[in-house]
Amino acid sequence: QKEVEQDPGPLSVPEGAIVSLNCTYSNSAFQYFMWYRQYSRKGPELLMYTYSSGNKEDGRFTAQVDKSSKYISLFIRDSQPSDSATYLCAMRGSSNTGKLIFGQGTTLQVKP
Amino acid sequence: NAGVMQNPRHLVRRRGQEARLRCSPMKGHSHVYWYRQLPEEGLKFMVYLQKENIIDESGMPKERFSAEFPKEGPSILRIQQVVRGDSAAYFCASSPPQSAGELFFGEGSRLTVL
């Protein structure tokens, strides 16, 4: 069983839709949770960074962490074609060694 | 305001040759990380380096792979005697001191082994 599970999709939605992306994890030691966006043939770009449980909002993006369920989510409001990319969740424990555990990534396509 | 710079962006090697991938961190960043992304898989941690020190190499294959971050110059990921299974995208990331793990990734180096 992988430490981090993420549905690879692809997920296709119409422009303007609300998108929900999710990851589950098994290691209760994870405390820091991140979402990265990766365009085709490009490097991952940090979107959201959260610590422990709760919500964090940044523009059209909202990240949620539920440590009791070992479940994290990224919501994208008013989705745009430019949001079409692969979204990777990542997480780590308290030790700051830069060793992130990534999900497989979910491919999102927003159709105009 | 350059980001993390990686070169070459694409590298083709024949089985048994050596591959060298270079990474220059963002200005002011002193921590470098290498990750590998195999087709249809997520990113896998390989190694974490600071200047002249390997901090965590728990994700590095035991043989043929090595990494360094010298006092001067870029970080280098070296793969000796490449095999087809080494074909992947190799990403370098950097972070400033005491960043709580916010990693900034480069565009990656795509290695193809024929």
Image (cartoon, rainbow, N blue to C red):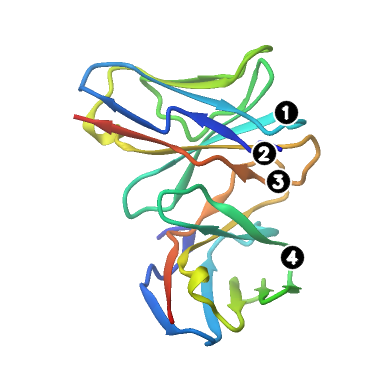
Q: Secondary structure at mark 4?
A: loop
* Dot 4 amino acid type: Ser
Please report whichever mark, 4 or 2, sits nearer to the chain's N-terminal start: 4
Q: CA distance from mark 4 to mark 2?
A: 18 Å
Q: Where residue A86 sits: x, y (%)?
A: 45, 63
Residue A65: horizontal and vertical position, in percent? Answer: 67, 72
Q: CA distance from mark 1 to mark 3?
A: 12 Å
| Chain ID of residue with mark 1 | B
Residue A52's tag is 4
Dot 1: what SS?
loop
Label 3 resides on the chain identified as: B
Callout 3 amino acid? Gly
Whole-angstrom CA distance, mark 1 to mark 2, is 13 Å
Residue toward you, B11 or A71: B11
Q: List the residue tagged with mark 3.
A: B101
| Three-letter residue code for mark 2 | Thr
